[in-house]
Image (tube, helix red, strand yellow):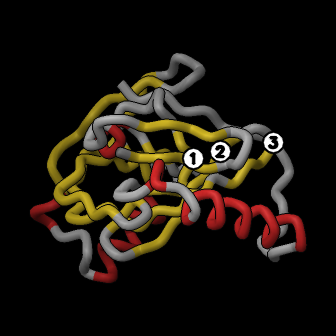
């Protein structure tokens, strides 16, 4: 089952301010100056009203996802699926079948189970990852267990806003 929430927080602007640049520099410096992170995938998180977002790439398309350990798979909306299909990076053979999921309100809906040929998380590329297309253009993008379970260990550094994938 896939669980997801709709959030009503205001959105921050996409421009980089001095705080964001300084935070990014601090993360880069913390990661570069220690052997603890050698050979690991580090992904910066963006916080918006307590929701943690990460940028990942699916089939060559870079998108901002909610980091959601409670979601059973990667979830995308029908809008993103349409873009992937029009670009030719999602093909007919990647469309698998219908899948039912339950959202946070308890409502059960149908979605389409698909195969993502590539999922790039930081510097790591995963192949043939299952995802669910939600038949709602405004459904949030969720980075769920179908990708996260490919890593042996995931650590979250809430102080510095990054995730370590091993």
| Residue 82 located left or right of residue 163 | left
Q: Quadrant of the C terminus?
A: top left
**Residue 161, horizontal then vertical, whole percent:** 68, 48
Helix, strand or loop at label 1? It is strand
Image point 57% across, 23% down: which residue? 104
Q: Residue furthest top?
A: 106
Image point 52% across, 17% down: which residue? 106
Q: Is there a contact, CB below 8 Å, between mark 1 and mark 2?
A: yes
Q: Is residue 142 above or below residue 59?
A: above
Of labels 3 and 1, earlier in sequence is: 3
- The answer to whether residue 64 shows anywhere in this view is no
Separation of residues labelled 2 and 3 (CA atoms): 8 Å
For label 2, the residue is 52
**Residue 133, horizontal then vertical, whole percent:** 37, 50
Of circles 1 and 2, the one toward us is 2
Packing grade of label 2 (10 A; few <14, some 14-19, many >=20) is some
Separation of residues labelled 1 and 2 (CA atoms): 6 Å
**Residue 128, horizontal then vertical, whole percent:** 17, 56
Q: Quadrant of the N terminus?
A: top left
Q: Quadrant of residue 105?
A: top right
| Residue 1 located left or right of residue 91 | right
For label 3, the residue is 49
For label 1, the residue is 66
Helix, strand or loop at label 3? It is loop
- The answer to whether residue 91 shows anywhere in this view is yes
Residue 88 is tagged as none
Q: Residue furthest left?
A: 93
């Amino acid at each position: 089952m896939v669980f997801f929430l709709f959030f009503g927080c205001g959105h921050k602007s996409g421009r980089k301010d001095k705080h964001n640049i300084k935070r990014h520099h601090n993360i880069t410096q913390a990661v570069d100056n220690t052997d603890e992170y050698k050979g690991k995938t580090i992904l910066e998180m963006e916080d918006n009203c307590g929701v943690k977002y990460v940028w990942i790439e699916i089939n060559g398309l870079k998108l901002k996802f909610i980091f959601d350990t409670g979601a059973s798979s990667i979830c995308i909306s029908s809008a993103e699926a349409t873009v992937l299909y029009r670009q030719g990076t999602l093909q007919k053979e990647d469309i698998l079948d219908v899948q039912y999921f339950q959202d946070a309100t308890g409502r059960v809906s149908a979605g389409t189970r698909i195969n993502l040929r590539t999922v790039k998380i930081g510097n790591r590329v995963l192949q043939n990852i299952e995802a669910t297309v939600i038949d709602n253009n405004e459904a949030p993008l969720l980075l769920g267990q179908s990708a996260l379970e490919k890593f042996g260990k995931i650590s979250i550094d809430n102080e510095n806003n990054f995730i370590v994938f091993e």
